[in-house]
Amino acid sequence: MHQDNIDQQGEIQNYKNHLTVSGYSDKTKSQYLLYLGDFIKFIKKDLEQITTKDIMSYLAHKKENGIKNVSLSAIYASLKYYFSAYKKTHLLDEIKTPKKEKYLPNILTKEEIKRLFAIITDKKHKLMVELLYSSGLRVSELCDLKKDSIDSKEATIKIISGKGNKDRIVIVSKKWLVEYYSFSQKYFKKVKSPYVFCKKNGTKYSSDMVQKMIKKYAENAQIKKTVTPHTLRHSFATHLLDAGENIRKIQELLGHANLSTTQIYTKITTEELKKVKSPLDNM
């Protein structure tokens, strides 16, 4: 093996160790290493010889090949961390962060939520979908959720090391708790697992499995919108705002670091304003 390749592999391993010690999640580590590897493959240069022009060339290449700005921003962030925070260089100082396209998230109406629930006959699947909507969980949080995280007395769930490695408390429906414990008394007599939801062998579900499951049920319910686990999270936040709940409380429940992230839902709820009749029309 060429010495340059050995040195480069050693550098990447050191970087991986740095991310681990810094407390980054496995998902973030995987993403950062993937983007760095793709960059190295494109540039075909030693990392110590990289210039600002090289980075600009790579980002332009990704953009020209149709990548969306939201993904380009993620690539930029990963390279920024490597070259600025880890390598202590100023290579990205003159490169502006790619602006993310601003899309309003997909939201289900309450009627569509009811249709979705009604179509699900599998009790465990229904409980999973209900929890995503009623507590605003991310799909990864649902899959990682353990039974000892539920406080049935307080009707709360503690999310351990959510996005950004931050713990938080979320609400849980009392109606859901009754249904879940009724189900679990029977299910967990046969299956031993620490997870709130698990497969028959006791292992947790993958995010992909849950996404495919929800997509199938939404199609069966004849919902024309694209429905994902995150759609249920968006719907949770929007319906709370519609009910007059404080946006800062919603921010805490969702685990958003910045209020600006939560404020996207205020733009969705303005749809309700369009239903209000002008006083002139009532004259």
Image (cartoon, rainbow, N blue to C red):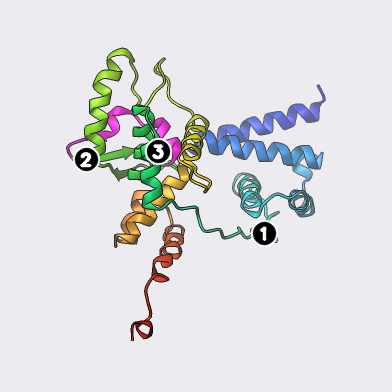
The amino acid type of the residue labelled 3 equals Ser
Q: Amino acid at mark 1?
A: Asp
Marks 3 and 1 sit apart, C-alpha to C-alpha, by 31 Å
Q: How far apart in space, not on screen, are marks 2 and 1 (Cα)? A: 51 Å
* Residue at image coords 30%, 19%: 187
Q: CA distance from mark 3 to mark 2?
A: 24 Å
Residue 151 colored in magenta in the image: yes
Say whether disc 2 or disc 1 marks the residue closer to the N-terminus.
1
Mark 1 lies on residue:
93
Residue 249 falls left or right of residue 199: left
Please name the residue shown 59% across and 33% down the image: 16
- Chain part drawn in magenta: 138-153
Residue 118 among those drawn in magenta: no
Image quarter hosting the C terminus: bottom left
Residue denoted by label 2: 174
* Sequence order check, earlier mark of 3 and 1: 1
Circle 2: residue type: Lys
Pointer 3 or 2: first along the chain: 3
Tags 3 and 1 touching, CB below 8 Å: no
Residue for badge 3: 161
Q: Quadrant of residue 3?
A: top right
Q: Secondary structure at mark 1?
A: loop
**Contact? badges 2 and 1 (CB < 8 Å):** no
Q: Secondary structure at mark 3?
A: loop
